[in-house]
Image (cartoon, rainbow, N blue to C red):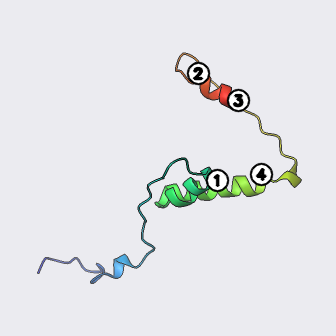
Amino acid sequence: MPYRSPGAPKGKSFLKGKPIRYYRPKGSAAIRTLIDDGFQAFNAARLGEACRIYGDKMLAKQNNTTIALTIAGAMTPAGLGGCVIEL
């Protein structure tokens, strides 16, 4: 039997958390579906939670929110000018 350090979980007690599901987007998924189904690991889940809060609270019509885009640096030489145009 392999050595087990004192205090280490016995058996499968460390596998009791929610499993991380494999996600493979099919076609052109809606952004909400992509965030809800794709961001499951710890920090990615926090990012998904932040996206939901941003969408639900800040972008709500009753809040009359203004969104501004500020860019620093050489975006056009880096090839990101087209991304800004699409916004």
Mark 3 / mark 2, whichever is N-terminal: 3
Amino acid, disc 4: Met
Mark seen at residue 70: 3
User: How far, Cα to Cα, is label 3 from label 2?
Assistant: 11 Å
Q: Secondary structure at mark 2?
A: loop
Q: Secondary structure at mark 3?
A: loop
Residues at circles 2 and 4 in contact by the CB criterion of under 8 Å: no
Image height check: is 52 above or below 16?
above
Circle 1 is placed at which residue position? 51
Circle 4 is placed at which residue position? 58
Residues at circles 3 and 1 in contact by the CB criterion of under 8 Å: no
Amino acid, disc 3: Thr
Residue 39 seen in this snapshot:
no
Circle 2 is placed at which residue position? 75
Mark seen at residue 36: none
Place residue 67 in its image quadrant: top right
User: Which residue occupies the foreground of this view, 11 or 35?
Assistant: 35
User: How far, Cα to Cα, is label 4 from label 3?
Assistant: 18 Å
Residue drawn at x 48%, y 60% is 42
Amino acid, disc 2: Met
User: How far, Cα to Cα, is label 1 from label 4?
Assistant: 10 Å
